[in-house]
Image (cartoon, helix red, strand yellow):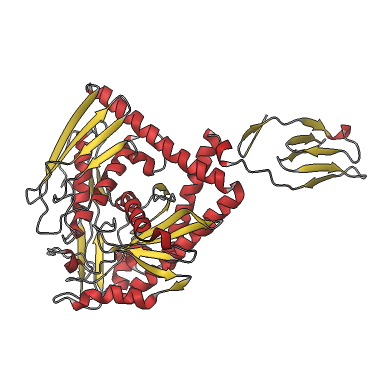
Amino acid sequence: RVYFEGGFRETPVVLAEDLQAGQKLEGPAMIIQPISTVLIEPGCTCVVTEEGDLKVEIGKEEVPQDGEVKLDPVMLGIFSHRFMGIAEQMGRTLQRTSISVNIKERLDFSCALFSPDGGLVANAPHVPVHLGSMSDTVKKQIEFCGKDLKEGDVLVTNHPQLAGGSHLPDITVITPVFNAGRIVFFVASRGHHSDVGGIAPGSMPPTSRTLVQEGAAIVSFKIVKAGSFQEDGVRELLMAPGKIPGCAGCRNIRDTMSDLRAQVAANNTGIRLVGELIAEYGNPMVSKYMLFIQDTAARCVRSMLIEFAKKKGLPEVGTVVAEDFMDDGSKIHLAVTIDQRDGSAVFDFSGTGQEVYGNFNAPPSVVKSAVIYCLRCFVGEDIPLNQGCLEPVTVITPEGTLLNPSAEAAVVGGNVLTSQRLVDVVLLAFECCAASQGCMNNLTFGDETFGYYETIAGGAGAGPTWDGRGGVHTHMTNTRITDPEILERRYPVHLRRFSLRPGSGGAGAHP
């Protein structure tokens, strides 16, 4: 028995000296020669010539139809890594073709692959706060214009509340992948742009009170229509905040437009690689393993939840509770109810403080990002972060609260600060490890010509058997920090000192 793509096959073994001229062998088969072995793959045919040579005619094995595709553990691993590899190649394209420090140097971007209904299939190990929320973004675009999408169309969006975004500087570019005239996948890239307008350079104003003060808000727009880049339309959207008193349009439109083109290019890389995968295995098999991967993640999460409930000694349907507070006193309250009968769980944030007149509000998509990130961390198996992780879970975020604000509420801080506190609360509920620094430690400055934004590393909390770590990006952020040489070359600043402050996190249990 020999393993080929699709599983093990019975494979006859033949000695070359026993073959006659004109004899034909259908693959799979193995021909043993004195100094080599010839493998005839399935779908191929080997003919022995008059001179005794072996002529192999390359054929194509019939691809099984949708209903005939069976789950194979080895193929599951192969497809998992192939899907992740597509997202990683998209990321490399985006990094190479972008020009802003945020995307090219800090790597503040994410790329992922989605099912036709918008469910996350696989992602590269980029920024968790992006990846968990991008599924909501894709689903919203399907809802808005799914029936109007054609080959050559590309969508752009960034609205946190109305379009599943995170905050306005994070602009998502989404491209449908067609096969035989229908959408079989979506590819998407999200990048943090250095400026999208608003009341402050960098579009990360600490004093914003409403969403319009934070920059250009795009619900849905075809940035590419029938293969043509809609530069004038995008420029108009990005400069629109300048019409609002006290606000400015995008302060560095050149970099922003260039990076948007880079995101389109990254998506084109994804389309090409998905097309190659489908050409290799056939759409039925690729689509089926897309579902298998999500189902596997769901089973792993269910098993993890049941194991945790039993370890805690919870009843058949039991609840654990955790809460923490923002600096202004706003409460984040979480009750996790686990049903051991089917491994499902409800993450209920009822009791969380009300929407604030500030920018610490976090849209529901960011809440899902925190939950799916933690669930993936809790699972001890090697599975890609995908929609299956949330399949057994229901997330409740009451409207009008800090975690489900109104469409006009400011949210720029919710993505970079509240998201970290959310992770700390989930980790506390599962008694996993100590809290992180609870913020992405944001620094922003600029003038009317440029905006600079940075997430500065902080500390990761210790666990029962391990020390915390200092000077690292934690949890929902996974970016680099800009190199001093790049900072001083690209911006009119001089860096005097950058260092760790020893002992700032406390001694802990393992000093």
Residues 471 and 352: in front is: 352
Q: Which residue sits furthest front?
A: 147
Give the residue drawn at x 50%, y 39%: 77
Give the residue drawn at x 22%, y 31%: 337
- Residue 69 screen position, x and y as percent: 56, 37
The vertical placement of 360 against 232, above or below, is: above
Q: Where, quadrant-wise, is the C terminus in this rendering? A: top left
Q: Is residue 191 left or right of residue 274?
A: left
Q: Is residue 448 left or right of residue 174?
A: left
- Residue 91 screen position, x and y as percent: 43, 58
Can residue 360 be seen? Answer: yes
Residues 225 and 51: in front is: 225
Q: Is residue 290 left or right of residue 28?
A: left
Residues 67 and 212: in front is: 67
Q: Quadrant of residue 4?
A: top right
Can residue 511 be seen? Answer: no
Q: Quadrant of residue 37?
A: top right
- Residue 50 screen position, x and y as percent: 93, 44
- Residue 55 screen position, x and y as percent: 82, 46
The vertical placement of 380 against 421, above or below, is: above
Give the residue drawn at x 45%, y 66%: 153
Residues 162 and 324: in front is: 162
Give the residue drawn at x 45%, y 59%: 176
